């Protein structure tokens, strides 16, 4: 692989996982995230390089190519996984940026590790980026990288994208390292957010806490630089999901799933990373109350909840897992009948084909996070419903609610409101659900992930026009 590039992506994770082959040797497998799908064409058009942690604790990995993608691994030690990743990233920043749904912890040694690891990523990019290159940094684990890069390489064009919400000033202000983080982000030329509200929170904080002049989306720095902070709502490979959903094998699998569930009249579905931001417990409680109230009958309705294992070594995630286990046990013990559990709970992760088959099966998709940057599951469901069927119950506090206005929108903290929306969606006539789904499909198909990547890269080019241009695809 070349030792330099004019387009560099930096994200916490490389888009591949280490897997053991039957003969015991180790190989890489592409992890099927939306980000890699979005960035793949831009990477190829610009001979790009992706810098990230490969997972695990191997330290001696060399840069390598996987299916034409050039990947540069950045190692983390076991202590750094604990302090930088599980600690500062997922025990401090994640809860602060998600409305303090869980209590954030502040530890100075976690912060020190965050600085060290951010420096390691920045140094790697400094090594690889050609003169005048474009570097696109991703997400909350790497907020100091833009400034670190700027100091070492003022020739670079730097973009940053935050995949999670940017919190209101009142919550962000709790962070003992608030100023360092704001200054870290200000190293970028363009800071992208999911929502206009996040961009506005950031600009307001910069004005209040760092004292820079701001006007609308723009921050004016004393050194003459301008930083733009704007919303770029992320999306999915909508066409890819629709094509998958149309496959005959997926249709057959959907029929099989429905039969395995006992051919109920209504299938409710939730698919989430097992995370306290996703509102899994509240939603299952709402559904079980509908059974208790006699509004829904286990003979003709079932809730399938897929919770993909996530951050299993972080204590709050272990507690949540136990809570869901207990709740599902109680609900099924109290309300289920032989062969008819109220909830099918699957703590596991599935191939994309199985996800598409589940989306096709779901009559009511229930996406009720307490706070979510976007929520791609909601958009994937819509993309898979080429039949214009199905109903979406969606939290007002997911970024996706801004675009998917025709969903049944709910406040997930309001259990009665959620119950009412579940029932409404369940009882809606086909004319109503079709009208809503058609409108949502137009939105998702028009604004897909390629459009998202292109609009970010174009905006970044505009803000520093003296640089070499990057081809969006
Ligand atoms: C962060 C922000 C923002 C889930 N289980 C399986 C599986 N998935 C896939 C889904 C979807 C993705 O994972 C989850 O994306 P979300 O958007 O729902 O949530 P986060 O992981 O929290 O993502 C979020 C996102 O970044 C992008 O900017 O939308 O707000 O929190 O694509 O399909 N995929 C497969 N098997 C599974 O079992 N194959």
Image: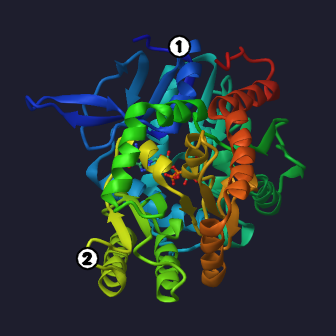
Say if disc 1 is inside 8 Å of ligand 1: no
Q: Which comes sooner in the sequence, label 1 or label 2?
A: 1
Q: Position of residue 20 (x, y in %)?
A: 17, 35
Q: Position of residue 123 (x, y in %)?
A: 48, 32
Instruction: State yes or no: discs 1 and 2 in contact (Cβ < 8 Å).
Output: no
Picture residue at 70% right of the left edge, 65% below the top? 409
Residue ID for mark 1 = 47
Residue 39, relative to residue 165: is it above or below? Answer: above
Which secondary structure lies at badge 1?
A: loop
Q: Position of residue 129 (x, y in %)?
A: 55, 21
Residue 174, relative to residue 83: is it above or below? Answer: below
Picture residue at 67% right of the left edge, 73% below the top? 411
Picture residue at 41% right of the left edge, 38% below the top? 250
Which part of the image, by quadrant, shows the C terminus?
top right
Badge 1 density bin: few <14, some 14–19, many ≥20, Cα 10 Å = some
Q: Quadrant of residue 468?
A: top right
Residue furthest to the right in view is 215
Q: Is residue 406 visible?
A: yes
Picture residue at 52% right of the left edge, 89% below the top? 293
Nearest to the observer: residue 169 or residue 29: 29
Q: Quadrant of residue 18?
A: top left
Q: Is residue 31 visible?
A: no
Q: Is residue 28 left or right of residue 106?
A: left
Describe the colour scheme in one phrase.
rainbow
Residue ID for mark 2 = 338
Which part of the image, by quadrant, shows the N terminus?
top left
């Amino acid at each position: 692989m070349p030792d330099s590039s004019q387009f560099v992506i930096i994200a916490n994770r490389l888009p591949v996982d280490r897997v053991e082959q039957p003969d015991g040797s180790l190989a890489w497998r592409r992890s099927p995230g939306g980000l890699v799908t979005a960035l793949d064409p831009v990477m190829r058009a610009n001979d790009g390089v992706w810098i990230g942690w490969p997972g695990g604790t191997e330290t001696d990995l060399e840069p390598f190519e996987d299916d034409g993608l050039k990947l540069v691994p950045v190692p983390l030690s076991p202590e750094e996984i604990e302090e930088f990743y599980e600690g500062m990233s997922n025990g401090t920043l994640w809860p602060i940026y998600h409305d303090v749904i869980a209590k954030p912890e502040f530890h100075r040694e976690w912060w020190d590790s965050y600085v060290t690891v951010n420096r390691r990523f920045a140094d790697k990019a400094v090594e690889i980026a050609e003169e005048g290159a474009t570097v696109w940094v991703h997400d909350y684990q790497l907020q100091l990288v833009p400034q670190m890069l700027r100091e070492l390489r003022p020739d670079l064009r730097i973009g940053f994208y935050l995949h999670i919400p940017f919190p209101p000033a009142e919550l962000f202000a709790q962070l003992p390292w608030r100023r360092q983080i704001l200054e870290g982000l200000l190293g970028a030329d363009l800071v992208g957010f999911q929502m206009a509200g996040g961009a506005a929170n950031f600009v307001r904080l910069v004005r209040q806490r760092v004292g820079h002049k701001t006007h609308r989306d723009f921050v004016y720095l004393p050194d003459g630089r301008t930083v733009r902070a704007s919303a770029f709502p992320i999306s999915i490979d909508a066409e890819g999901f629709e094509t998958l959903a149309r496959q005959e094998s997926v249709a057959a699998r959907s029929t099989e799933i429905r039969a395995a569930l006992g051919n109920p009249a209504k299938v409710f579905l939730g698919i989430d990373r097992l995370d306290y931001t996703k509102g899994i417990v509240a939603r299952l409680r709402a559904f079980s109350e509908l059974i208790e109230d006699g509004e829904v009958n286990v003979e003709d309705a079932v809730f399938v909840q897929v919770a993909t294992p996530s951050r299993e070594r972080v204590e709050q995630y272990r507690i949540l897992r136990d809570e869901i286990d207990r709740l599902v046990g109680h609900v099924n013990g109290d309300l289920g009948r032989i062969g008819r559990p109220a909830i099918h709970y699957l703590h596991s992760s599935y191939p994309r084909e199985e996800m598409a088959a589940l989306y096709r099966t779901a009559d009511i998709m229930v996406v009720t996070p307490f706070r979510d940057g976007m929520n791609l599951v909601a958009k994937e469901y819509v993309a898979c419903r080429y039949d214009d069927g199905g109903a979406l119950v969606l939290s007002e506090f997911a970024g996706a609610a801004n675009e998917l206005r025709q969903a049944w929108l709910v406040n997930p903290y309001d259990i009665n409101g959620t119950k009412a929306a579940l029932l409404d969606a369940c009882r809606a006539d086909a004319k109503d659900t079709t009208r809503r789904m058609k409108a949502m499909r137009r939105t998702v198909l028009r604004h897909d992930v390629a459009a998202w990547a292109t609009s970010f890269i174009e905006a970044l080019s505009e803000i520093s026009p003296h640089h070499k241009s990057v081809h969006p695809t």
